[in-house]
Image: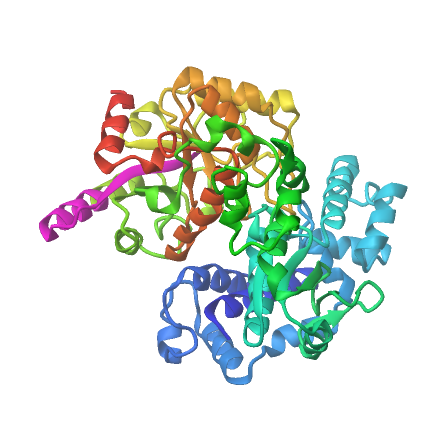
Amino acid sequence: MTNEEIVEIFELTTKLLELHGENEFKIRNYQNAAFNLDKTNVDLLTAPIEELSMIPGVVKSMAAKIDEIRTTGSLKDLNDLLANTPEGILDMFRIKGIGPKKIRTIWKELGITDTQQLLLACENGDIAKLKGFGEKTQETIHTNLLFLQSNSSKLRMDAALVLAEVLFDALEKKYKVEITGEVRRKLEIVELIQLVVSAEKPAEVQSFLNTLEFLTPDEKASTPFIWRGRFLDRTIPVEVRIVKPQQFVNQVFVHSSDEKHLIKPVGTTTLLKTALLEPHDSEEAIYTKLGMPYLSPELRNGELEFDPAFQSKNLITWDALKGTVHNHSTWSDGKHTLEQMARAAAELGLQYLGIADHSKSATYANGLNEERVYEQHQQVDDLNAQFQKEGLNFTIFKGIESDILGDGSLDYSSEVLKTFDFVVASVHSNLKMTEERAMQRLITAIENPYTTIIGHPTGRLLLSRPGYPVDHKKLIDACAANGVILELNASPYRLDVDWRWIPYALEKGVLVSINPDAHHIDGYMDMHYGVAVARKGGLTQEMTFNALEKEEVQTYFTKRKIG
């Protein structure tokens, strides 16, 4: 049991209480507890119950519930609610644009208990007839439900990597093994988890795989040299190829490259033919054979990487990052204090932290009103003075993630905006827009002289929400015309802007910032995902904003600052 699992129990209990129309006071207690437990640094598994009840937003009755979970491993309230909830109802919680109260109405008035019945009801027009719904809500539910269903057997890269590593760890104890395929190539969406195993006896590996309790074999789809199946609680397919030791490197290479990369003509041959012609000791040797520089798996997309100009680029790496901008603290909805976020960034060897807590429109995220903005700025000044006194070469820059309102304006006056070192402008509300409406809103924000960075420009959530329609060329052109930095939001839930638009941004001279959108110190690690996809698009160190030295960033902010 972990803090995160306890928070998940409280969140699910809150949803189910709402679903069943329980007492509002009880719902609010669970809701407040879930929100505050997600932000706390207290170890919920070991803290005395008296300390638990001192956590803001956690009343004594909720502290007792935490103690019940860690003592018994479950929560009676949740178990009772689950016992009275059709299993298919839980799947409806994943649909964007529909909350527990609307799900209750659908369940109680139409008797719908699963997503397939819900889809049919949308197509028959039954949802629109419900009080408080209408055609617009029905269309939203239908669209988001279809989107979820079409992605049900896919995973984000972070989730797929976790599963691949679980299987890798099990196999590595007995065999030489490598993760390959879409996971190794750092695709943002993974549809198949693949590994290659070196073994003289394929049947032995197959038997071993069948003993692993977390796997379910698909015997009909498997062959003597390829084990196919899936993880017990997942629908994503898994494939393990078993090859002779002398073919291991070759097969790892082949199955870590896009087909277009393998069959692209190189002189009179291809990488595929070269890889299959004879055994190689390393993947580097395959490229050397053709007089090519080594291309790491994330670059093997069959598109840009064969251009000599691309091959000569100084592509961005994790080690080249000098700082991180667009991060959140406990001032808004972050889990760690500003000082904790800063010191954790410094421990990673970074030179600066751009704090960009949520702005005042984001009341759901404890956004900062004007008074709290000035209070935070004072703390930034105090911390920077403290760091200087300690001899720590580290600076916090004063930023904000300012909401882009419906008309494209930012949600502070110019007098407030000019007090920040930088402003990340992002859309968080009214996401259902036509392309024309979205572009008007985004370009107005980009043309605002106080906007420094345009944040997660399409608003997408991978496998969950497709995002609003955007004309990327017009967006990037506007950034170029106004000197605005384009965010590559490195959260594996977003990875927005899409890496396929990086070449156009570079062509237009637009800087890209790989921002973790970190809400806790571990969130900094998401920049690994951002670096991986940025490299796919050919992002260079020189065009990566947060690869600039601290002094260069300070100069950049100073030059753009107005008033």
* Residue lying farthest to the left in this orientation: 389
Foreground residue among 393 and 65: 393
Which percent across, then down, holds residue 535?
48, 38
| Residue at 56%, 62% in the rendered image | 162
* Residue lying farthest to the bottom in this orientation: 72
Which percent across, then down, holds residue 514?
42, 39
99 versus 446 height, above or below: below
Foreground residue among 414 and 132: 414
195 versus 137 height, above or below: below
| Residue at 71%, 58% in the rendered image | 236
Work out which quarter of the rendered image holds the C terminus and state it: top left
Can residue 448 be seen at all in this image of the molecule? Answer: yes
Asked if residue 51 is among those painted magenta in the image, a careful observer would answer: no
User: Is 385 situated left or right of 536 in this image?
Assistant: left
Asked if residue 385 is among those painted magenta in the image, a careful observer would answer: yes
Please identify the quarter of the rendering in which residue 561 is found.
top left
Which percent across, then down, holds residue 280?
56, 54
| Residue at 64%, 38% in the rendered image | 270
Can residue 156 be seen at all in this image of the molecule? Answer: no
Which percent across, then down, holds residue 517?
43, 45
91 versus 52 height, above or below: above
* Residue lying farthest to the top in this orientation: 481
Foreground residue among 178 and 499: 178
User: Is 520 situated left or right of 268 in this image?
Assistant: left
- Coloration mode: rainbow
| Residue at 75%, 68% in the rendered image | 85
* Count of number-bearing discs: 0
Q: Provide the residue span drawn in magenta.
A: 379-402
